Image (spheres, rainbow, N blue to C red):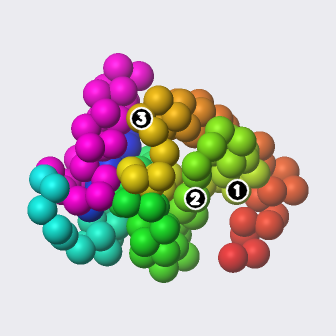
Amino acid sequence: MKIAIGCDHGGVDLKRLIVPLLGELGHEINDQGCNSNESVDYPDFARLVCTLVEKGGCDRGILICGTGIGMSMAANRSSAIRAALCHELFTAKMSREHNDANVLCLGGRVIGPGLAIEIVRTWLATEFAGGRHLKRINMF
């Protein structure tokens, strides 16, 4: 699977842990930055990742900022994006199974690295259930 990933300065440390995991899991990674702790504007990176997902250049995206809130708000401005802000495993699983989330948002200052890795693993491994859930997604 092709996965675009991006972050702001609040998510750089967590992104540095997730990128190698994606490679270990056999995914193709399209890293859109940022790559330092210097202050940047999160909407710029959300737009880069979401454009790749919208246009089919990547299958899914992962966005990370300090809380994940800003990235999720910026990502969900597009009707083609279903971004889910997840802080634990149940919502990560349900965001895929019931909502077919195509972008995962994480808070680098909210969750620890071990939990973040498990959230990413769960989110990537969970398939969309379809059925009645597809009808609801099509109502957007």
The reply to whether discs 2 and 1 touch (Cβ–Cβ < 8 Å) is: yes
Kindly tell me whether residue 36 is visible in this rendering: yes
Q: Mark 3 points at which residue?
A: 113
Q: What percent of the width, then of the height, locates residue 134? A: 77, 58
Magenta stretch: includes residue 25: yes
Span colored in magenta: 9-35
Mark 2 vs mark 1, foreground winner is 2
- Disc 2 secondary structure class: strand
Residue type indicated by callout 1: Asn
- Left/right of residue 32 with respect to residue 110 in the rendered view: left
Q: Mark 2 points at which residue?
A: 84
Q: Which mark is residue 117?
A: none
- Label 2 or label 3, whichever comes before in sequence order: 2
Residue density around tag 3, few if under 14, some if 14–19, many if 20 or more, within 10 Å: some
Q: Mark 1 points at which residue?
A: 99
Residue density around tag 2, few if under 14, some if 14–19, many if 20 or more, within 10 Å: many
Q: What percent of the width, then of the height, locates residue 111? A: 49, 45
> What is the quadrant of the N terminus in the image?
top left
- Label 2 or label 1, whichever comes before in sequence order: 2
The Cα atoms of the two marked residues, 2 and 3, are separated by 18 Å
